[in-house]
Amino acid sequence: MSQSALSQRMGAVLICAGGLAGAIIAAYAYIAPLTGVTGTPGALLVIVTSVLVLLGGLIVALIASRGIRNLFRVLLCLGILGTAAAAAFLHEWVLIAAMAVALVGLVMDILTPARRAAGTRGALA
């Protein structure tokens, strides 16, 4: 595996890891008693948006079309920043750290060179 292919995958892995960690942290805060946000709609919304960040990371990893990848990158950036803002309102500081990991992965994905047509195409178009 070339260095470029590894770095492209590492960005998507970090996005997915941040989304998964965020969903787990938000689910714990939603379910566990005495977290201050147990059963609140805000915590439930953060669970959903964290799962969407996870799915967005998977989509970015699979799609090779430049236009669609850029669209999903913009949507991921909005989702990550929005989820981090919601986590700040919920006082879930660990969740903000998980979104920071996802944001680092997004920046890595943006800064990697475009995929070459030979061998590193995405699974979807």
Image: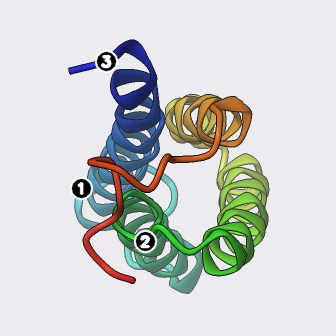
Instruction: Answer with left or right where residue 77 lies relative to residue 48.
Output: right
Q: Position of residue 118 (x, y in %)?
A: 34, 50
Q: Earlier in the sequence, mark 3 or mark 1?
A: 3
Q: Mark 3: which amino acid?
A: Ser
Residue at 61% in and 69% down: 69
- Taking the image as shown, residue 37 lies to the left or right of residue 67, namely left
Q: Disc number at residue 32?
A: 1
Q: CA distance from mark 3 to mark 2?
A: 19 Å
Front residue of 20/92: it is: 20
116 relative to 83 in the view: left or right = left
The spot of residue 80 in percent (x, y) is 67, 56
Residue at image mark 3: 2
Q: Is residue 119 above or below residue 54?
A: above
Earlier-in-chain disc, 2 versus 1: 1
- Judging depth in this view, the residue of 116 and 95 nearest the camera is 116
**Mark 2 surroundings: few (<14), some (14-19) or many (≥20) residues within 10 A:** some
Q: For the view shown, which residue lies furthest in the front direction?
A: 118
Q: Say if 74 sits above or below 116 in the image.
A: below
Could you tell me the amino acid type at mark 1? Ala
Report the mark closest to the observer, 3 or 1. 3
Disc 3 on helix, strand or loop?
Answer: loop
Q: CA distance from mark 2 to mark 1?
A: 37 Å
Disc assigned to residue 63? 2
Residue at 36% of width from left, 71% of height from top?
55
Q: Nearer the viewer, residue 94 or 116?
A: 116
Element type at marker 2? Answer: loop
